[in-house]
Image (tube, helix red, strand yellow):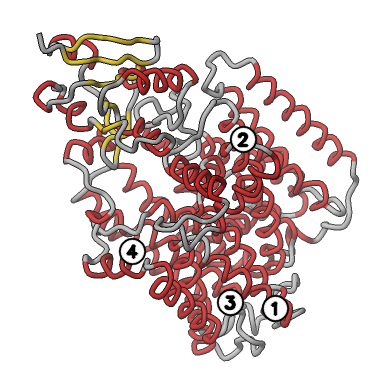
Amino acid sequence: MNGRWNGSPPSSKNSGVDSGMHLDKILAGSGIVVSAVLIAYLTLTVGRLVFILAGVLTLLCCLLWLAIRERAIQEFPGSWAGEAKTGKDRLFVVLLILFLVLYVLSIAALHTRASLYERPSGYFILVSLMAGVVALEILLPHQRKALWVLPQIVLLGISVAWSQILIVPGILGSDPWWHSMFVSRILDLSAIPGGYWYTHMPLFHLEVAGTSLLAGLDYRLAAMLSVSLAQIVIFPAAIYLLGNALFDDERVGLLAGLMLVTANQQVGMSVTSIPNAFAAIFIALVLYLLFKLKYTRPARAGSLALLLLSAIILTHTITAACMALVLFVVWGACRVYGCLREDAATEPYPVTLGLASLFLAAMLGWWYFVSGHIAVLRDLVRQGFTRAYFVQNPPIVDAYPGLVPVPEQIFNNIGMFLFFTVSLVGIFYLAGRGERNGFAFGTAGLILLGIGFFPLITGLSFIEHRWWYFSQILIAVPLAASLLLIAGRPRARRVPTAFLLAACVGLLVFTMIASPAADTGNPIFSPNSAVRTGFTESELWALDTVDSMRTGPVGADRYVQVVNYAGPDPAFIIPADDMLIEGTYRSYGMDALLVREYIRGHPIFCYDGMFRLTHDPEKTLAGEGYDRVYGSGSAGLFRLNDL
């Protein structure tokens, strides 16, 4: 073996079917036991159906692998790759035209939307149809497929992400407001300002600042055309190359790129680009260098990998920690594989202990001697990574997610749950086919997935949604393989199977792009759990007006405080969480409060969670002696009348 799959059916010696230890059976059996225990534990303790559903899906996918493993290991990828270089182009051209027609219709749907700041439901249907069309193009035989399919995947990613960015007048998200302030400071000073969290990790901000300076754009458009565009373009290409390196089948790589660019966490990070997301681009590129280019051009791969690893350290702490973990897991998995199997590959590991140790030492050294972030790690370790370090909510806020209707909870999470659990089939395949590098890659994805989910039931916290984002990058390849493995059929039914698989991909994409993690502005699908993370033009005008007429701090719902980063007074807006929860204001001594019309009928951010008001704040304020001194239709300013 040369460290990657060569595209031919595995021999009995190396297949994992006839040789001694079946790692895939061990993993699947362990998954069945763990998921069964997890289902029982969650049923007796938490009792939330949506969490139990994750355990049930895991159990079913483990059983599914045991049912199809013999056929899958012997036939895949040959059962799908056998006609990759043959076939007529006519159907492919028809599908390409259909994609372009649907793309134009999706733009028309956005242009004719009934609500100014919400994408219509028809848009999501059109995007899902486009994803199904691209999946069908991937599955049908055609020469030079990647040349035509990758641009369509990029166009799809641009549509899903940028359609959100461009329909609002300001910045989307919470963290981007702080990063906007930091970029503005860099541009004003023509230097990196000192004393900030990112003073010694400025690559993201320099990228956006450079784009803003050269193109004359504001932060929103500069971030979109630099960081967001880089994510949308590089991720599918890198994952496509990784899929080819592991399976020697472009269908796996292309389908993985399609699934990743429409994954909910990926879409969310492409909309609200932050350093965490930007640094993850380098993770994908490093993995390609180590799993593919290292075996053809080792010197070049090593030099480029060191350069990209340095860039990760200079961009974000959590991403650097993730990269260090992946390096050690890949090295460790290769060592374990070599100890368990006599037929393990003899070629160099994709990751050496020296490289992993060098990166860890550089990362910790930078944190200790330069940036000072080692203090945060020290505090986290001292407190045992408890949830309270990151999240401090009153019980009523923690209880709110459980009050959301169960069908809505399932809809919000089913796409991501299927993304992760179905990928287990591909991970088991990587473990069972008798190939070391594939086993190591699958193990790394599985570890990242565990870090993202097990803290939810243990009371610990590692900022889970960031690790879901990382795990989707690695697991997209096993997911694509899983879909092809499950759909494996005799040649006579190839085309019908391709249409069925494409339909499944379209449905999965719909559940992903319509979930609150990917779309926070559409209450049609998640009216009780989607919080809009952006201001309307009227709200921005109202904030400017209130700022000009106020005499002191103004209380408002928590999201509004992000404007503190954009103005000279960091104490302009004070979160009124407790007042909004309790429905009482005067006793807190707040002289002025800003009430957005939006919060009267939608869930809002509250502390580190979300909450839905049980009272009408305008009526309550009037009853407590507050007078409305300004109103714009989208927001009102109430001032306490002392008379």
Q: Is residue 162 found left or right of 317 in the rendered image? A: right
Q: Nearer the viewer, residue 280 or 8?
A: 280
Amino acid type, label 4: Val
Alpha carbons under labels 4 and 2: distance apart: 40 Å
> Of discs 4 and 2, which sits in the foreground?
2
Instruction: Identify the residue shown where x is 63% and y is 65%.
Output: 71
Instruction: Identify the residue shown where x is 46% and y is 30%.
Output: 534
Amino acid type, label 3: Val
Find residue 34 and name its label: 4
Circle 1 sits on which residue? 294
Q: Is residue 638 found left or right of 358 in the rendered image? A: left
> Of discs 1 and 2, which sits in the foreground?
2
Alpha carbons under labels 3 and 1: distance apart: 29 Å
> Of discs 3 and 2, which sits in the foreground?
2
Nearer-N-terminus badge (3/4): 3
Residue at the front extreme of this rendering: 189
Q: Position of residue 213 (x, y in %)?
A: 65, 44
Q: Is residue 80 found left or right of 417 in the rendered image? A: right
Find residue 17 and name its label: 3
Please tell me whether residue 162 is drawn above or below residue 443 in the rendered image: above
Residue 344, picture quadrant: bottom right
Nearer-N-terminus badge (1/2): 2
